[in-house]
Image (tube, rainbow, N blue to C red):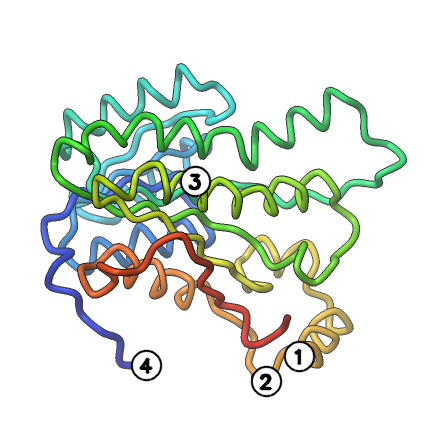
């Protein structure tokens, strides 16, 4: 594939949550290829260190469990010292662990929302003052089409992901006057190594192809390309909306 280059992203400071693997690693790599100054956080220190090492010093990594908001704020301060205040934030971190609704406890429910939603707001809260001071910025929240499709088997995850859209809309209004754009990228079933290992059986893949308008399974690179567009100046008038990367499966 021949992809676009976005000159406005060169030297732009980009923070990515959950950037050590899967879609997040693809996003980190895509921004680095644009010449951006990229920093990411992840709780998987080994994978994070490996990705940062492979970038020949171009990418900064701070290990962090995003369920711990104090740790998140500290990690962002360290990134600011290393690559500068955030001009772009990509709220990517999430885990779509399956769970039976009959077995969900209040503690598990709260942990799932901490994993998949709560940190997004506090990441925005942490970077917004610097974006305001700079005169603008771009925030991209990663949603999911799982709840659009009425997918079952993970009610806490689907609830959290549906709430991402409400977070995007309200923060786009609150921050828009400062020229900070907030959008949601909505992936379909993306063929990360995690998905291939845990759930991508031949039967499941064939059902997915039948749901999609396009016949090809979706590589993580296509999510990253949409994120790049929304972070760039090309998307200067895009805010408070959903941008689907799901091959027409809704």
Residue drawn where x is 31% and y is 23% of the image: 75
Label 4, residues with CA under 10 Å away: few <14, some 14-19, many ≥20 = few
The reply to whether callout 4 and callout 3 are in contact (CB within 8 Å) is: no
Q: Dot 1 corresponds to which residue?
A: 209
Q: Answer with left or right where residue 136 lies relative to residue 158.
A: left
Closer to the chain start, of discs 2 and 1, is 1
Residue drawn where x is 71% and y is 28% of the image: 109
Residue drawn where x is 32% and y is 81% of the image: 1
Which is more toward the observer, 214 or 122?
A: 122
Residue drawn where x is 41% and y is 68% of the image: 222
Q: CA distance from mark 3 to mark 1?
A: 27 Å
Q: CA distance from mark 2 to mark 4?
A: 17 Å
Instruction: Label 3, secondary structure: give it.
Output: loop
Label 1, residues with CA under 10 Å away: few <14, some 14-19, many ≥20 = some
The reply to whether callout 1 and callout 4 are in contact (CB within 8 Å) is: no
Which is more toward the observer, 120 or 21?
A: 120
Instruction: Label 1, secondary structure: give it.
Output: helix
**Residue 229 vertical position relative to residue 87 in the rendered view, above or below:** below
Q: Answer with left or right where residue 3 lies relative to residue 156.
A: left
Q: Quadrant of residue 115?
A: top right
Which is more toward the observer, 181 or 74?
A: 181
Instruction: Label 2, secondary structure: give it.
Output: loop
Q: CA distance from mark 2 to mark 1?
A: 6 Å
Q: CA distance from mark 4 to mark 3?
A: 26 Å
Q: Dot 2 corresponds to which residue?
A: 215
The reply to whether callout 2 and callout 1 are in contact (CB within 8 Å) is: yes
Quick one: which residue is furthest to the right in this view?
A: 102
Q: Dot 4 corresponds to which residue?
A: 1
Closer to the chain start, of discs 2 and 4, is 4
Q: CA distance from mark 1 to mark 4?
A: 21 Å
Label 2, residues with CA under 10 Å away: few <14, some 14-19, many ≥20 = few
């Amino acid at each position: 594939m021949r992809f676009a280059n976005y000159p406005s992203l060169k030297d732009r400071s980009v923070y990515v949550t959950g950037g050590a693997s899967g879609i997040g690693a693809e996003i980190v790599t895509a921004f680095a290829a644009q010449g951006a100054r990229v920093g990411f956080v992840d709780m998987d220190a080994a994978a994070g260190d490996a990705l940062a090492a492979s970038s020949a010093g171009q990418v900064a990594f701070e290990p962090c469990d995003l369920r711990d908001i104090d740790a998140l704020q500290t990690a962002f301060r360290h990134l600011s010292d290393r690559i500068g205040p955030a001009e772009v934030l990509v709220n990517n971190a999430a885990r779509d662990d399956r769970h039976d609704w009959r077995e969900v406890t209040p503690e598990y429910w709260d942990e799932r929302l901490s994993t998949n939603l709560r940190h997004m707001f506090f990441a925005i809260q942490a970077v917004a003052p610097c974006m305001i001071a700079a005169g603008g910025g771009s925030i991209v929240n990663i949603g999911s089409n799982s709840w659009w499709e009425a997918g079952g088997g993970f009610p806490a995850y689907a609830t959290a992901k549906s709430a991402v859209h409400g977070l995007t809309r309200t923060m786009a209004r609150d921050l828009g006057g400062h020229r900070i754009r907030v959008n949601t990228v909505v992936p379909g079933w993306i063929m990360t190594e995690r998905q291939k290992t845990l759930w991508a059986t031949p039967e499941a893949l064939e059902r997915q192809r039948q749901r999609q308008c396009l016949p090809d399974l979706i590589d993580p690179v296509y999510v990253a390309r949409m994120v790049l567009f929304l972070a760039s100046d090309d998307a200067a008038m895009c805010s408070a909306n959903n941008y689907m990367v799901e091959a027409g499966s809704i």
